[in-house]
Image: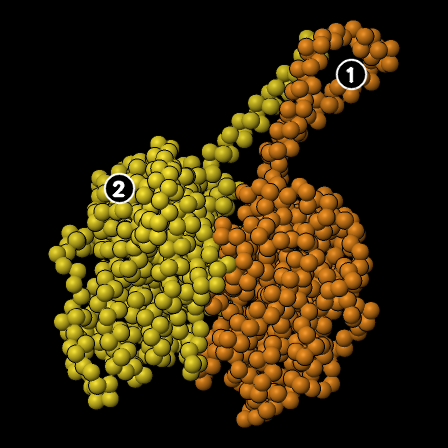
Chain colours: A orange, B yellow
Amino acid sequence: MPDFSSSVKLKYVKLGYQYLVNHFLSLLLIPIMAIIAVELLRMGPEDILNVWNSLHFDIVQVLCSSFLVIFISTVYFMSKPRTVYLVDYSCYKPPVTCRVPFATFMEHSRLILKDSPKSVEFQMRILERSGLGEETCLPPAIHYIPPTPTMDEARSEAQMVIFTAMDDLFKKTGLLPKDIDILIVNCSLFSPTPSLSAMVINKYKLRSNIKSFNLSGMGCSAGLISVDLARDLLQVHPNSNAVIVSTEIITPNYYKGNERAMLLPNCLFRMGSAAILMSNRRSDRWRAKYKLCHLVRTHRGADDKSFYCVYEQEDREGKIGINLSKDLMAIAGEALKANITTIGPLVLPASEQLLFLLSLIGRKIFNLKWKPYIPDFKLAFEHFCIHAGGRAVIDELQKNLQLSGEHVEASRMTLHRFGNTSSSSLWYELCYIESKGRMRRGDRVWQIAFGSGFKCNSAVWKCNRTIKTPKDGPWSDCIDRYPVFIPEVVKL
Amino acid sequence: MDILCILSSLLILYLIFKIWKHIDSKRDQNCYILDYQCHKPSDDRMLSTQISGEIIRRNKHLRLNEFKFLLKAIVSSGIGEQTYAPRIYFEGREESPTIQDALSEMEEFYIDTIEKLLKRNKLKPKDIDVLVVNVSMLNSTPSLSARIINHYKMREDVKVFNLTAMGCSASVISVDIVKNIFKTYKNKLALVVTSESLSPNWYSGNNRSMILANCLFRSGGCAVLLTNKRCLSGRAMFKLKCLVRTHHGAREDSFNACVQKEDELGRVGVHLDKTLPKAATRAFVDNLKVITPKILPVTELFRFMLSLLLKKLRRSPSKGSTSNVAQAAPKAGINFKTGIDHFCIHTGGKAVIDAIGYSLDLTEYDLEPARMTLHRFGNTSASSLWYVLGYMEAKKRLKRGDRVFMISFGAGFKCNSCVWEVVRDLSVGECLGNVWNHCIDQYPPKSLLNPFLEKYGWIREEEDADTFKFRT
């Protein structure tokens, strides 16, 4: 387990100093208030009444001071950074015809890889231990034997997943296509010309002055990168809304070779997408589901090991696939640690931070043999959405953050029901928590996502209103069956 | 003193403090170009007529009709003898590119460009706060932006965005992202890396609309340093005045004007439709409608409105003559020179430059930078605007206070434009690292005629497709 304390000490001193200087004026107010309080206590009730009676209330003075107070409070409220709300979101529920139960997957595998039985064996072992269920879905093109990953098929998969999710979002929120001001589409592995964002603009006839962005290649954490971009744009443009489409198009990326490390994505990645509506309008304050509190991005690309851990390359036969290195877990842990050192001070209660600081001082300055103190994040958040990258990732994070089974239940069940849907998995997990009726007003949610490069991005949302169990949505027909017990190994 | 007086004075002081902070934050929202560096590939990648002919001949699927078509396209393209192509074209492997080819092509570009840029400005990679990379036709895992971060060991908290598939106008979109980030975050340094990947995108079939893309695009790229730091604004070259984006994806014909798809035999290529010029004009007109009020002086706008009014009044009594007036190609009727001094036009092709020159009523002097860039470097996609800017700088045309208008088009169909103001006198002193430095004295050349015509002009006389054989 990575050591949490080594690179942190200077950061804390710096943070404390920044806090002191940034809030200097408000901190100055404390002694003034203390003096006034002492004065009041000294004087006693009759003296206070005498002082009150002796004040001359000139009408002009009263008007001026009340005007000043109102003016200042207006300036104060207007200069605060705009709050960014998540109004609503919708996740794509694939049709039953796209389902890939284990039996189907293994049968296809045996037929496609009939020349390399060892690879078939390998895929079977992966599937047994993957934590995936029998209802995950692959796009129609992959159901063919052999699969037909043409550009046309990839486009039709994109149209199917994106347009369905967006139609659902329009219905839920009553949003009109021509009211969209910002559109961000992120799909890591498929990037046709014209871009997927242009495809969305074409289908829904969006306005010609829309600000559209098409991010790709940024891995499974691209969803939160899109949220970051949307937040930055919403700070600059008042009274606007932004639609984010997070998806991963599986069709063009099916690995047709038999190199083991590259067969893993075939077994884990599944079809899925999510469409999210964000806004900074005051009128959306009441119907918004969540408020964005913090978003922290960490990029470990400077470290060579992290950079090469998820790498697209050709195998010996020239077939393209994504190579996942064996130290993926360790690297994810490192990236998480880097991310936590930034987000910890923003979200942890003062008590935890103080304890952490004390343990740090004890170990570094006084050289006491204490174990490094891991802050208890359960005090800061009620719900956790960990990217369903694979069973190992969820296990690792559960251990590192010392979370209980219930905290990671959303992630495990999403992995079971939908597989690894890449950047949209965080939204399926959030939907699970809502469908279980666990989301109350004031609850804080922490979304953590990892991506190639190696990135670790996390977002902190605060629930704006208690959310009733949704009647439709990807979980509506199966939520009562969950949580299921997922055995260590499913015998195939 | 009266308690009320003390309270009021405290409140007034706080108010003044808040107002001052508000004004101060507004001052730091300007987007400046600190420096930029275009990429000049090594001379062994120069594409001469001879080599172009060989490459075309290598494609076994092409027949006489396609050769005739290609000849016509290349001769009228305005591209010269010194443009650059990816290495695999010279090695004969353009039909079977590997991932490594695409990556090395990009590496060659960004390692050279970013190195020079940072060294010249005495900055370290760790100083970069924002990185935006846009390469339209390459999508690798990890992304190109992650590769750059890995190579230069940038900081962990760098804000990075990797845009793809946004066409030749993606440069302006990247600047848009940076501009918006600068409004929220103070004291930041941004690096925009723009290029195009040609190695993996060679079309190996014979569909005419798709082989055109093979011949028109060339290798090139640019890295631009932008900042909103007040301490660096003294060294800055340009300041962003306004940026307007227009997206015509809602229209079917605009959307289908430039599409990457498979042909009848499953080979992937970029289809450039015949309706592309019309789509471009439409998008351009819409874009101008929005940006013109922002950049031209009020007097010119009034004059234009008056002339429009007069035209309408003159037209309405005699309805019969309206059809004649409608036939004429759209001339803007407004004098852009009143607000803009230099025009940076995307070098999409000779037709594009001619069309824009006609509609904006520009002289040869105005179009010279774009034409010369097309001739010397070809259509380098999103980075072409920066080469045109480099030409203007090398020719010492940019004086302090001048305004530069950048226009670019992209698949989808988009038209994005922005206006920069020159903040430092760039017409004196030498421009270090300018990619035109070695050859600016030879421009403009006496003739832009393409030697393709004299070498391969005989193809036009060939009639019989079956007995046709390529002569060297």
Quarter of the rendering occupied by the C terminus of chain A:
bottom right
Q: Residue at x 35, y 72 (%)?
A: B209
Q: Amino acid at mark 1?
A: Glu
Q: Where on the picture, by quarter, is residue A330?
A: bottom right
Residue A8 rendering spot, x and y as whole percentages: 60, 50
Q: Residue at x 53, y 82 (%)?
A: A148
Q: Amino acid at mark 2?
A: Leu
Does residue A134 lie above or below A20 as drawn?
below
Left or right? Give the position of B177 relative to B275: right
Q: Residue at x 74, y 82 (%)?
A: A490
Confirm whether residue B38 shows in the render: no
Q: Circle 2 sits on which residue?
A: B398
Q: Chain of mark 2?
A: B
Mark 1 crowd level (few <14, some 14–19, many ≥20, 10 Å Cα) = few
Residue B94 rendering spot, x and y as whole percentages: 33, 77
Q: Nearer the viewer, residue A165 or A261?
A: A165
Q: Where on the picture, by quarter, is residue A324?
A: bottom right
SS for tag 1? helix
Q: Residue at x 43, y 70 (%)?
A: B260
Q: How many marks?
A: 2
Does residue A359 lie above or below A482 as drawn?
above
Mark 2 crowd level (few <14, some 14–19, many ≥20, 10 Å Cα) = many
Q: Nearer the viewer, residue B10 or B450?
A: B450
Confirm whether residue B283 shows in the render: yes
Q: Nearer the viewer, residue B32 or A51?
A: B32
Q: Nearer the viewer, residue B394 or B283?
A: B283
Q: Circle 1 sits on which residue?
A: A39
Left or right? Give the position of B198 relative to A389: left
